[in-house]
Amino acid sequence: EIGKVMKETVVMRWPNVYFFEDVLLVSTFPAEYSESARSIMRECIFNAGLIKDKNSTALQFITEPEAAAIYCMEQLQIYDLEAGTNFMVVDCGGDRVVLTTRKLVNRNQLGEIAEISEDFCGSTYIDKEFIKYLSSKVGYGAMELLRTNHCGQMQYLIQRFTREYKMLFTGESKEFKPYYFDLNYTIPMIKQYVTDKNREILEEIEWDIELGFYDIKSMFDPVVEKILRLIHAQLDSSLETCSAMFLVGGFSESKYLQNRIKREFQHIVRIILIPSDPTIAIERGAVMYGLSSMNSDITTRGLKY
């Protein structure tokens, strides 16, 4: 279905473009994927009707860290950094945070100088802390029954928390205003699973749960502290100075995470940058890689463009 939509979109926007002849597909994948996993990806893309044959050169692959690094390298050019400069890409996703330190060999060439390091400290772990907090109010059994029987409401709950609370939290108590979660509106089906003991308390507050400053901060801090330790370890693993740091990925839009990283590393790393739309930095890097590849500018996959 996705393949069909992609081809229809190309035809609609560029009627003179022939999909199989004129379109280069660049697919990103996690760095730890094996050759076998990439072969499965290629087969799936072939089965989706996006390439003529399984070995088509119209499909290329690039790792997510490489794509992010290409995009970040382009952003660094405004700083006119010298060849040999080291920079770190901090990719903050949903499940994991992945770090890669690279050397700017010249204006358009990268070299990897440190092993990729990662840990499970992405934004979904804050969601889990939020669910734990709500469970302490409505009962753990009630929340588990909601998850099992009303998955849609559970997803809406997480989406609303992310949109209205998680990404807007700055960690500054002076500007903080308490948040209120109306369970009647957000997850109405939870009421049938709440036991009498918790029900009495919730009815007194009209099913309106308050999220105070320290409530939300306590959801963030274990995850953020883990990220800070991961970055420190990566910096320590290199014998050379890291001159710039990029935050990419959806979780890097968190104001609190941005503020904590800047405060922690501003005296260690000279340039700390967050792109205007960090969520799609990997996709933009992949497009840049593909365009340069079509112009025959790449001699080493993913490291030159």
Image: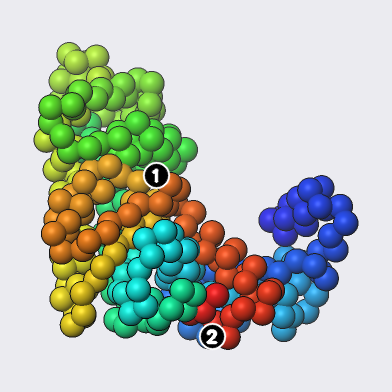
Residues tagged 2 and 1 counted as in contact (Cβ below 8 A): no
Please give the name of the residue rendered at 21% of the width and 46% of the height, measured from the top-left corner: 259
Residue position marked by numbered label 2 in the rendering: 300
Q: Nearer the viewer, residue 151 or 35?
A: 35
Q: Position of residue 272 (x, y in %)?
A: 28, 56
Q: Is residue 53 above or below residue 91?
A: below
Residue type of the residue flagged with mark 2? Thr
Q: Is residue 189 left or right of residue 169?
A: right
Lower position in the chain sequence, tag 2 or tag 1: 1
- Cα separation, mark 2 vs mark 1, equals 48 Å
Depth check, mark 2 against mark 1: the one in front is 2
Q: Residue furthest right?
A: 16
Q: Residues within 10 Å of mark 1 (few under 14, many from 20)?
A: few
Q: Position of residue 99 (x, y in %)?
A: 31, 69
Residue position marked by numbered label 1 in the rendering: 148
Image quarter (top left, top right, bottom left or bottom right) of the C terminus: bottom right
Judge whether residue 302 can be spotted in this image: no
Residue type of the residue flagged with mark 1? Thr
**Res 46 → quadrant:** bottom right
